[in-house]
Image (tube, rainbow, N blue to C red):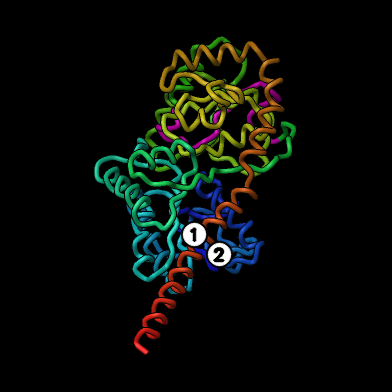
Amino acid sequence: MKIAMIGQKAIPSRTGGIEIHVEEISKRIVKKGIGINVYCRKGYCEQVHNGKYEGINICYTPFIKSKHLDAITHTLTATIHALFSGCDIFHYHALGPSTLAFLPRLFGRKVICTVHGLDWQRGKWKGFATKYLKFGEYATAKFSHKTINVSQNLVKYYKDKYGLDTQYIPNGVEEPETLNADIIKTKYGLSKNDYILFLARLVPEKGVHYLIEAYKKLKTQKKLVIAGGSSHSNEYEKELHDMAKGNNNIIFTGFVSGRELEELYSNAYIYVLPSDVEGLPISLLEAMSYGKACLVSDIPQNLEVIQKGKEDRYGFSFRSGNIGSLAKKLDYLLNNPVLLERMGIEVQNHVIKEYNWDKITDETLSIYRQVLDKKKNKYYHQLNKDKEAATLKI
């Protein structure tokens, strides 16, 4: 078995949830003795030595670097390379790359598509790009031998719209090490529990603008830390800086990784994710893995993580897009530190148990074997039919 991972920007990288997902399962797949090509775009991460990263074959193929052509041109060159590299399974990630999932099928290869979210809903895409991504959604349902969804909400969506039984395989986390405030104290003057944390890409659908407006309504000494870089959304990032102008307690860190990232999670008072659109947010899972109580918008994908039944058992929610609701709930939680501390251990245990990368990798490999076994069974079925026909002739 040889796998081609196509659709991510690059690994190792924290530019997005897809990159983290692909890296984590790929590292575990190669340890089981299975060959895997992960297709990457130069410039999105440091190039690895000799084209190898933790046993994974890192393949760089050409692409046109622009907002609209970047992903699709890279998907095309990656698919062609994988066809000539003898890959048995083509695993496409996200809607845009999945539009080309029909190509390996023309050559008798097996195709898996993982849907990380309905990308056509994201604010940065307009016009033709939105229509193309909707076609990508159709492609994940019609061109793949098996469709994987990262949230139960997406599973329901595909069942309702396409009558398709898809496989639920979520994102995951590892149990982290909690760190003292060292780098973040030196760089930003941050200490344990003295800041509210938002950590994600600075794009409109993440709702950072709601958080800034809600924060400005609060009477608190706690700072607001906004960590993350833009993704084809520099204009939106500038708007956020303009909104925060004059308030020295609102800190923009830019993109963070490594120890600095770990320190930000470790020492936050609370993590807030006010998004309008999500697949299954890895940043939310990561914050919970550090034992942090989280406040999230009440979109289904967020509630799926923090709720047990209809109760906010593993976190707290507010009405999506409602600045007043966000400010009110945040004010309540800022004044109830004991409540957040009590919740922390339960939150951490829950997320590490339910969203485990080892389990997720095993479930993904099970899908690979299922689609390959179908191919094998089809071959033997045809072989037996040919033998029966030959016997009848005799």
Highlighted magenta segment, given as a residue range: 183-207
Residue 38 disc label: none
Does the stretch in magenta take in 191?
A: yes
Q: Is residue 119 left or right of residue 43?
A: left
- Which residue is depicted at the point 48% across and 33% down? 301
Residue sitting nearer the eye, 33 or 21 = 33
Residue that label 2 marks: 36
Quadrant in the picture for residue 355: top right
The reply to whether residue 19 is in sight is: yes
| Percent coordinates x, y for residue 192 in the rendering | 71, 25
Q: Residue at x 60, y 66 (%)?
A: 34
Amino acid at circle 1? Met
Asked if the residue at tag 1 contacts the one at tag 2, i.e. Cβ–Cβ closer than 8 Å, the answer is: yes
Residue 130 versus residue 28: which sits nearer the camera?
Answer: 28
Name the residue that disc number 1 marks. 5
Is 94 contained in the magenta span?
no
